[in-house]
Image (cartoon, helix red, strand yellow):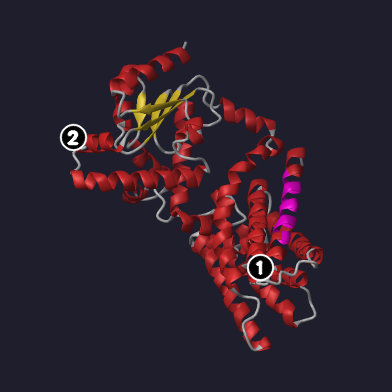
Amino acid sequence: MNKYTIRRYLLFIISLFINAFGIAFITKAFLGTSPITSVTYVLSMFTPFTMGIWTILLNLLFVILELFFMTRKDLKSDWKMYLLQIPIACCFGLFIDFSMFMLSWLNPSTYITQIIGLIVGCIILAIGIALEVKANVAMMAGEYLVNVITRRFHKEFGYVKLGLDVTLLLTACILSLLFMSGIHGVREGTVVAALAVGPIVHFISPYYHIFDRWITYPTQQIEQTSRSGKNIVITIAREFGSGGHLLGEMLSKELGIHLYDKEFINMAAKESGIDEQYIIKNEQSIPSFWLKCILSKNSERPLEDSLSADDVLFLAESRIVQKLAAKESCIIIGRCADFVLKDYPNIIKIFCYSDFQSALSRCVTQYGIAREQAEEAIHRINRNRIHHYEYYTGKKWGDPHHYNLMLNTGSIKLETACRLIGEIYRDMNK
């Protein structure tokens, strides 16, 4: 085990404590607790055992249940991760009890102070989950159970996790009704935690790039910056109606390099196994931005373990972008290519935008779209592109700091833009 792996485990342990502290903070707000700890909190209210002890016992129950969904092959290939859940469960339970002891002084007496405590707790929990994702070395028993069920029945990770959370909430309510003659421990704070933590994780995660060099083995860092060799890649992100694809075609002819845009549909279908019609309909869009944050990012696993078709498609296209960059100098339209290739040295990142009237005129005269349909299409497609880019990259779409060149194609002719980019390309190719 090298020092970089040890650092990852250190981050993981720290994240466990932060998670436990966040859960304790939410619980001490007295507006309910997080869904994953709702059963353990209710049990601690009418039994002599603490919330931490019940957390250990529940997680050990999850470990046993996992065996019913795992094949011998699964267990043999993943036995280290499986057994690691046991010490993790013990640590997490002890961290929760210690955090509750640390916060014994916290007793908000008014509803507004309870709300503040709940919000602070959600932020702390999100910080811990984002750090756990960054560490990416182990898995909590609840998450591992979801992963096992997902793999066994070929379902989407986010929805299986949602099903587990709902099951735990219903169980907590039933236990509360049976033993305390009313619903206790499950309140509005439980709903807020379920809905708020995921999006907070989404917005916090990009700031954790500061750990990349500390936890990444140097050879991996070198590989990330050397795969492209001497190839020069031009990436074009664009607003709808700004003529980004037309600009790409001009550059392809002038520079004699391949343009990749619609070709991605067939390539991604082969890479991911997803039907081409699904890709055409859903490519570079998020059906519900906030729902995706709640289902996927409110999770202690990285993107690769979420089995959403949208995620699989994004990963497939990202791999294609990397392969193309390693293969040849080329032009790539969209596909978050500027982000996927952010560590490549020979890249020209372009963003095309224009005023609404210019975009509308181009849609009507050059794209052949009816005027009333073009107006709606501009707003809808740009909104989808923003959500897609910002969800998967954590960066702001159209931020000039992310690109080498911002082109207002409403006031600059495409021919002029083509000559300008061509000059930059030739200078880099010397």
Residue occupied by mark 1: 114
- Residue 83 seen: no
Q: Quadrant of residue 406?
A: top left
Between the residue at mark 2 and the residue at mark 1, the CA separation in whole angstroms equals: 58 Å
Identify residue type, mark 2.
Thr
Identify residue type, mark 1.
Gln
Residue 166 in the image: state x and y as whole percent.
55, 72
Say above or below: 163 vs 392: below
Nearer-the-camera pick, 13 or 424: 424
Q: Earlier in the sequence, mark 2 or mark 1?
A: 1
- Report the disc number at residue 365: 2
Looking at the image, which residue is at 53% across and 69% down? Answer: 163
Looking at the image, which residue is at 74% across and 68% down? Answer: 56
Residue 428 in the image: state x and y as whole percent.
47, 15
Left or right? Give the position of 245 relative to 57. left
The answer to if 138 sits in the magenta stretch is no
Dominant secondary structure, magenta: helix
Looking at the image, which residue is at 71% across and 53% down? Answer: 15
Looking at the image, which residue is at 73% across and 42% down? Answer: 5
Nearer-the-camera pick, 358 or 134: 358
The boundaries of the magenta stretch are: 8-21
Say above or below: 223 vs 298: above
Classed neighbour count for the residue bearing mark 1: other residues with Cα under 10 Å, few (<14), some (14–19), many (≥20)? many
